Amino acid sequence: MVIKEFIGIYLEKDALHYCGAIRTVSSWQMAIPGPSMDPSGIIPGSAPTTLREFLQRFSPRSGRRIFLTLPRSRFFIRDVQLPPVPMEDALMSVQSMLPVTCHLPLDDIFHDIGFCRLPDGRVNALVIYAFRREILPILDIFRETGHEKSLAGLFPISLGIGAWLSHQQYPMPMALVISNENPSRELAIYHQAGCVYSMALQNAWTAGEAAAGMESVLAKFHLPADSLHGLEYSDNCLPLPDPPRNSLSWLPPVQRNYGVAALSVALSGQQQIFLNGGPPRIQVFQPWKLFVPALCVLAVLLSLWTVNLNHAVGRGKQSVSEMKDEVQQLQQKVRPLEKVRDALKKTESLSADIDDFIRLRPRLFSCFNEIARLVPEGTWFSRSNLQGAELTLQGQSRDALKIVEALRASPLFEQVKLLGSVSRAPTGVEQFSLTLRLKDVEANP
C-alpha cells in the first residue's frame, strides 16, 4: 500500500493553524504530524517562532509534503488577461512583462505565476510576489529543521481557499471576502479552475470606499451583487453557505482552521504555487496518466482471455508479439508527423503573438514613456489596465490634480479624468484612480 503524508500550515503573526492527512491507494484520512499531536489544531504564539517549534516536533520524512500559506498582506498580486493561447506561450508572455507588472525590482522579490483558463478560452494569470527579505527567514527555518525537501508550496491563503471551494463544488464564478490576519481583509474572485483576482481591502478605506471598490470588481467580472459572500459572519456580506457537496467532511471546516485551506491544494489538481526563487511550474500533460490505466485494462483482458482460451496460448502470444511490433513500427512512423504538426501549430501561435506584439507594444511603450515624462516626481502607479483605447491607472502622488492637468496637456491623450474619490493618507500621499483615452487608437482593437 502506497501512503503519502501531507501537512497544511497557515502561519499568521499570532498563531499557526495546521492540518495533517495521509493518502492511500483508496482513500484519504486525517493523520497526526508528530508524536503527542492532534491531527489538526491551532498553536498560539508569535511567528516565526511557532513555525520553528512546530517543525521540530516531528522528524523529516521523504514521503511527506508540506504546504505553507501566509496572509494576503504578505504578498502583492497583479492579474493579467491573455487571449486563448497555450499555457507555455502564456508563461513566456507574462514573464516578459514582469519588469512592468511588478512594482518592485525583480532582484528584491520572490515571484510565481498562477494560470487559470477561463470558460471562454482566455488565460488569466496572477503574478504573485513578495519581498525576499520576508520569505527567506521562513525558508531558512525549513532548511535548519531538515524539512526543506518536504516544502512543496508557499502561497497566499486565498489560493488555498479557492482550492477548497472548488473541491466542495460551490457554484462558480464566486466573489468572496476573506478576513484572515486582523484587521486585513481581501476580496477574491474564483472560477472553477482557481483564483482569477485578488484585491487587498485597505484598512484606511471607509465603508463607502470599500463598498465602491468591491462593486467595481464585481462589475469588471460581470458578477451580480448576490454572488459576493463572506467567509466569516463578521464580513458584512452574505455568509458563505454550506457546501453543496461536503466531500471533505472528514476535515474540520475551513472557517475554524485555515490549515485545511493549505491542505486543499494537495487534494485538488490545481497548479501549486511556490515562492522560493524557482521558476513557475505550469501543469502539462503527463503521458503516464493515460498509458498506465490503458495497460492495466489490457492486462485484465489478457488474463481473462488466457483463462477462457487456454488451448490457444501459444498462438495468442505470437499474435500479441506481432501486434506489438506493428504498433511500435506505426508509432515510429507517426512520431515525426506529430512533431511536424506540433511545430506548425506552435509556429502559427507564435506568429500571431508576434503580430500582436508589433502592433501594440511600441504604442504602449510610447504612452508609458509619455506618462513617466509628464507626471510629477514621487508619483508611482500600482496598477494599469488597457481596455481598447481606454487606459485605467491606479497609484499615489502628492497631488493627483497636477497629474490630471499634466496628462491633459499631452497630444497623446484625451478625456483624462479621475475615477471615484481621492483618498489622502496621514503622510500626505494621495491615492487615486484615473482613466484616459489614447488618441488615434480604435476602441475595439
Image (cartoon, grey):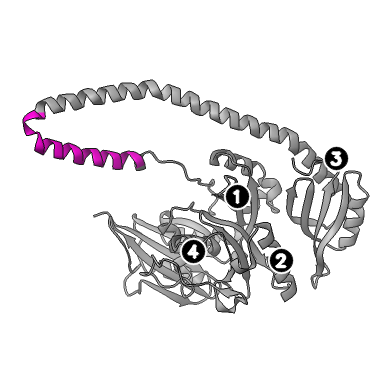
Mark identifier at residue 170: 4
Magenta stretch in the rendered image: 290-313
Could you tell me if the residues under marks 2 and 1 are in contact, i.e. CB atoms within 8 Å?
A: no
What element does badge 2 sit on?
helix
Could you tell me if the residues under marks 1 and 3 are in contact, i.e. CB atoms within 8 Å?
A: no
Q: Name the residue under label 1.
A: 125
- Residue 151 to residue 341: above or below: below
Q: What residue type is labelled 3?
A: Asp
Closer to the observer: label 4 or label 2?
4
> Of callouts 4 and 3, which one flags the residue occurring earlier in the amino acid sequence?
4
C-alpha gap between disc 2 and disc 1: 21 Å
Q: Name the residue under label 3.
A: 440
387 lies left or right of 410: left
> Of callouts 2 and 1, which one flags the residue occurring earlier in the amino acid sequence?
1
Closer to the observer: label 4 or label 1?
4
Residue 178, located in which quarter of the rendered image?
bottom right
Q: What residue type is labelled 4?
A: Tyr
